[in-house]
Image: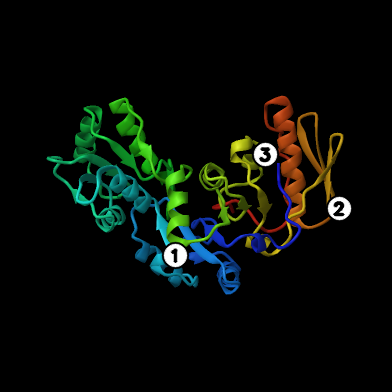
Amino acid sequence: MLEESTTALVDAHDLVMFDLDGVVYVGGEAIDGVPEAIDRVRDSGRHVAFVTNNASRTPDQVAQKLTKVGVAASAGDVVTSAQAAARLLAEEHGAGARVLMLGGEGLRVALLEAGLEPVEDPDGAVAVASGYGPDVRWRDIMRVSTLVRDGLPYVASNTDLTIPTPYGLAPGHGVLVRTITGFAGVEATVAGKPERPLMEETVRRVGGDRPLMVGDRLDTDIEGARAIDAPSLLVLTGVTWLDELAAAPPRLRPTYVSPTLAGLFEPQPVPSVEGATVALGGWTASVEDGRLKVQGDGSDADWWRVAATACWRHLDEVGHPADVSDTTPPGPVRRLGAE
């Protein structure tokens, strides 16, 4: 269930880790209010990190995009799944190890910076590393799959099944990982969210003892925070909406929820529960005959808190999600890509 913060949420943390797409920007534009919010976090003396599972771009390229949309950032603020994968390989195989690479520029640069030698020829390679790369060739996928089947260790940057594009969601790097591991009959070592390596790499590189993860996706950002026992703030400017939130099992539930990044600078109250009724700030919520029912008036953030709590209690009790199909959340925030 949700936890309470009696003071502004950010006050309890010295590192705020932001996911990118759906949290900081959507497509080529910053989400309203986000550049100012991130400046405010920085001005308070806290560390800021931008954490991405996308292994195709270098930290410098990510920082340039952030700067272009109005968010102040340097390469040192950005941590990628490629960097986490490279650390895993360097720790396992040592400096100078030859790594067969299947991916783009972001992965190549990360391997080089970790003191490894990315190669295209498998001769002498001690492991395979893969990351999203739009120009990866099928013949290379076939060769890598065969080598992994025959015992070559495999580190994947991430297992995201989708990736946002100008023409909508498209197959992500996770589809490639499934292809290789399904053929080879092995499991990949995964560096990106929701696994621990990327989260730990972020804390190691950027600093801080009390991290907070801010994300929009339950199965990467929120689950990734839980992997390192860090609290998380779910914002509703990206892919997660009421139906996903209502169906979230405990491992995917955020510590806090807010419609926007404004929640960083506000207390985070928790609803009271009396019988089947959940109440907070003028709102009451319950699940009746399997359907979520929310009544009253109050802040948008409190609406989401009572709705989530009522749905999770129902899910834990009966084993299936509440029906939220006829429930309309308040406010202007809508699902990423929705009209």
The type of residue carrying mark 2 is Gly
Q: Residue at x 20, y 47 (%)?
A: 97
User: Residue 125's x, y, as percent?
Assistant: 18, 41
In the image: residue 22, left or right of residue 236: left
Res. 102 in view: yes
Residue annotated with mark 1: 77
> In the shown orientation, is residue 271 left or right of residue 90?
right
Q: Are marks 3 and 2 in contact (CB under 8 Å)?
A: no
Q: Give 232 or 217, whichever is nearer the viewer.
A: 232
Mark 1 vs mark 2, foreground winner is 1
Which residue lies at the image location 13% right of the left edge and 41% below the top edge?
Answer: 124
Instruction: Please state the horizontal and vertical placement of residue 312, each as a whole percent of the image.
Output: 71, 36
In the rendered image, which residue does mark 2 sit on? 282
Q: Amino acid at mark 3?
A: Ala
> Circle 3 sits in a helix, a strand or a loop, which is it?
helix
- Give the percent coordinates (x, y) of residue 212: 58, 55
Mark earlier in primary sequence (1, 3): 1
Can you tell which mark lies on residue 246?
3
Mark closest to the chain's N terminus, 1 or 2: 1
Task: Tell me the crowding category of disc 1: few under 14, some 14 to 19, or many 20 or more residues within 10 angstroms, Cα based.
Answer: many
Of residues 146 and 187, the one drawn nearer to the viewer in this rendering: 187
Q: Residue furthest bottom?
A: 43
Residue at point 53%, 62% (across, down): 24
Task: For marks 1 and 3, give the one nearer the viewer.
Answer: 1
Q: Earlier in the sequence, mark 3 or mark 2?
A: 3
- Give neighbour class at mark 3: few <14, some 14-19, many 20+ (Cα, 10 Å): many
Which element type, helix, strand or loop, lies under badge 1?
helix
